[in-house]
């Protein structure tokens, strides 16, 4: 029956939960997916009037203009609409800081940045004259046209261009939507940086990215990001923590992003997702668990497809990462729902948070708010002052202490997790001004008694996505995120061993990349190399 058999669930004694007491959790589990906005995945979760308040897409006239000089045959605007396929948008939208500036403000500055690869763009990197201008979110279509031209070498058709304004219905993502309706959904949860993966994942655990904005160039996070993390605070306070990854990914991104701080824990605190399933069933979850989806084939990260031009030329299908992510989410949720240790972690004392690192260039209609600069680093990149938030991302809180149909309308952000962990276990002062500014999640757990898991929603267990195993065995081209990950791994290895980088991540193929990652795993991550695999 997969990782869990509900028949094995043991009864929980009443003594482990005292109704009405606080705090209502002893364990926090975070599952962080990749690169989807709120409107893209949950915009149509509720229709107007279904709940008292919900900032979604239903009943709103949402559109972006088509740049008139593109000569694209079709309407002058693209309206928000239902995605026609589960692999849209394909190719992958822009997610780096200059692209997000265009998406939010409709600006391209200087004009020469248009139709240029992001690595060749120049200052001010499409940022508005006033960095505190209110975003109009009117440049998603224009930016996607730029990205499409660079990636595919031609202009898009109107249907191709319109992909970036599409979103999925609850029927298309039944696991995510079922849990959003069955527990609490945040309709004003923002990531921390208007840019891509590494800066946002760094902020999630450090409330800082050491001044870095974009992922590249390869190796800078692994070798230069020295921001202290909440994981170290947990360790110093005698609290337990673990990072769990799909062993198919081989190496954890969290470890590489924070390699300068977390290298002493590589051998002991990083495990496989199958170790997580076991720990949940046995009631031995750590105080804090962070789960990474697979960012390699077979994808479970929900990331839009990458390497579109080469993949389409080879007639290879898109990786179906949303379906893989739905399957992973169902498994993780079932692990928490069926956990019933009377003395350890269980459904009543575990808070599961499901979130995304950043929006990945997909459309959202809510302007990101300003935010205080972390104030911990003098380093700056691309002139960004870290004075505004990233885009709104889908986030859910699954807990026995939350009522079904809860919509949290107040502003929360990724560093709310740092704030929550700090408040729960007295971990000391804020890491930076950013987590000091973030609200605590604990007050949202308002029930006087926990919900019995028999009353929790049952979600489907999607089948393994078609072609997943096949694609994982073919020497397909690496996506930009995959290249970034292998680049950080090779840079860290070279730094530790005092030798040149073993390979060029810009040109490496999938088979060679896996070989390098496996070598590094064997040397640095024995608990993953020897962990459970199914």
Image (cartoon, grey):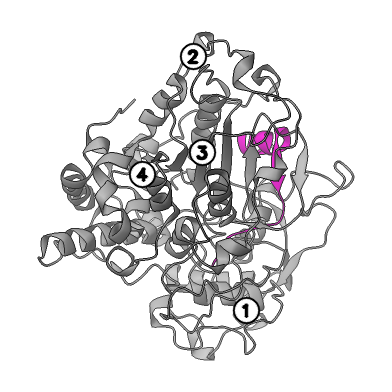
Q: How far apart are marks 2 and 1 (CA)?
A: 57 Å
Residue at disc 3, secondary structure: strand
Which residue sits furthest right? Answer: 49
User: Residue 490 has which mark?
Assistant: none
Mark 4 lies on residue: 297
Residue 381 is left or right of residue 404, and the answer is: left
Residue 397 seen in render: yes
In the image, the segment drawn in magenta is: 172-193
- Nearer to us in this view, 493 or 79: 493
First of labels 3, 2 by sequence position: 2
Left or right of 132 in this view: 294:
left
Classed neighbour count for the residue bearing mark 2: other residues with Cα under 10 Å, few (<14), some (14–19), many (≥20): few
Determine whether label 2 and label 1 are within 8 Å by CB.
no
Q: Give the residue number, with chain letter if any, for mark 1.
A: 71
Q: Which mark is residue 5?
A: 2
Of callouts 1 and 3, the N-terminal one = 3
Q: Which of marks 1 and 4 is nearer the N terminus?
A: 1
Q: Nearer the viewer, mark 1 or mark 4?
A: 4
Mark carried by residue 29:
3
């Amino acid at each position: 029956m997969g990782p869990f058999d509900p028949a094995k669930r043991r009864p929980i004694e009443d003594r482990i939960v005292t109704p009405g007491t606080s705090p209502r959790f002893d364990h926090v589990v975070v599952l962080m997916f990749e690169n989807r906005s709120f409107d893209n995945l949950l915009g149509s979760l509720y229709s107007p009037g279904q709940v008292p308040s919900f900032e979604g897409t239903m009943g709103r006239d949402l559109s972006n203009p088509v740049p008139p000089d593109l000569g694209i045959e079709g309407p002058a605007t693209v309206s928000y609409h239902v995605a026609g396929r589960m692999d849209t948008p394909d190719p992958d939208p822009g997610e780096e800081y200059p692209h997000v500036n265009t998406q939010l403000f409709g600006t391209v500055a200087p004009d020469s940045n248009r139709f240029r690869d992001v690595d060749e763009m120049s200052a001010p990197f499409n940022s508005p004259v006033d960095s505190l201008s209110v975003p109009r979110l009117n440049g998603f279509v224009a930016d996607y046209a730029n990205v499409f031209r660079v990636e595919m070498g031609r202009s898009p058709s109107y249907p191709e261009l319109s992909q970036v304004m599409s979103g999925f219905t609850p029927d298309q993502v039944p696991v995510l939507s079922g849990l959003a309706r069955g527990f609490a959904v945040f309709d004003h949860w923002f990531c921390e940086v208007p840019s891509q993966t590494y800066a946002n994942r760094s902020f999630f655990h450090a409330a800082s990215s050491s001044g870095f904005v974009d992922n590249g160039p390869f190796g800078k996070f692994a070798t230069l990001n020295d921001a202290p993390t909440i994981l170290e605070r947990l360790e110093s306070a005698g609290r337990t923590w673990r990072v769990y990854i799909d062993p198919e990914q081989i190496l954890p991104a969290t470890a590489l992003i924070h390699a300068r701080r977390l290298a002493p824990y590589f051998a002991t605190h990083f495990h496989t997702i199958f170790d997580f399933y076991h720990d949940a069933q046995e009631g031995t979850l750590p105080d804090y668990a962070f789960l990474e989806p697979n960012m390699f084939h077979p994808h479970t990260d929900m990331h839009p497809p990458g390497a579109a031009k080469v993949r389409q030329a080879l007639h290879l299908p898109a990786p179906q990462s949303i379906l893989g992510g739905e399957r992973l989410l169902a498994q993780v949720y079932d692990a928490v729902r069926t956990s019933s240790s009377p003395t350890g972690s269980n459904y009543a004392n575990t808070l599961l948070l499901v979130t995304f690192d950043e929006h990945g260039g997909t459309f959202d209609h809510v302007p990101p708010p300003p935010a205080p600069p972390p104030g911990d680093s003098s380093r700056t990149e691309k002139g960004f002052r870290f004075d505004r938030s990233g885009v709104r991302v889908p986030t859910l809180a699954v807990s026995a202490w939350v009522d079904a149909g809860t919509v949290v309308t107040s502003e929360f952000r990724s560093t709310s997790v740092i704030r929550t962990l700090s408040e729960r276990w007295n971990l000391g002062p804020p890491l930076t001004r950013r987590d000091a500014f973030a609200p605590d999640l604990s007050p949202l757990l308002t029930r006087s008694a926990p919900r019995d898991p028999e009353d929790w929603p049952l979600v489907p267990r999607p089948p393994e996505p078609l072609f997943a195993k096949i694609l994982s065995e073919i020497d397909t081209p690496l996506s930009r995120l995959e290249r970034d990950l292998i680049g950080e791994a090779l840079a860290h290895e070279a730094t530790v061993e005092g030798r040149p980088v073993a390979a060029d991540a810009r040109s490496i193929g999938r088979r060679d990349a896996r070989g390098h990652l496996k070598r590094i795993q064997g040397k640095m991550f024995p608990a993953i190399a020897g962990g459970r695999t199914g």
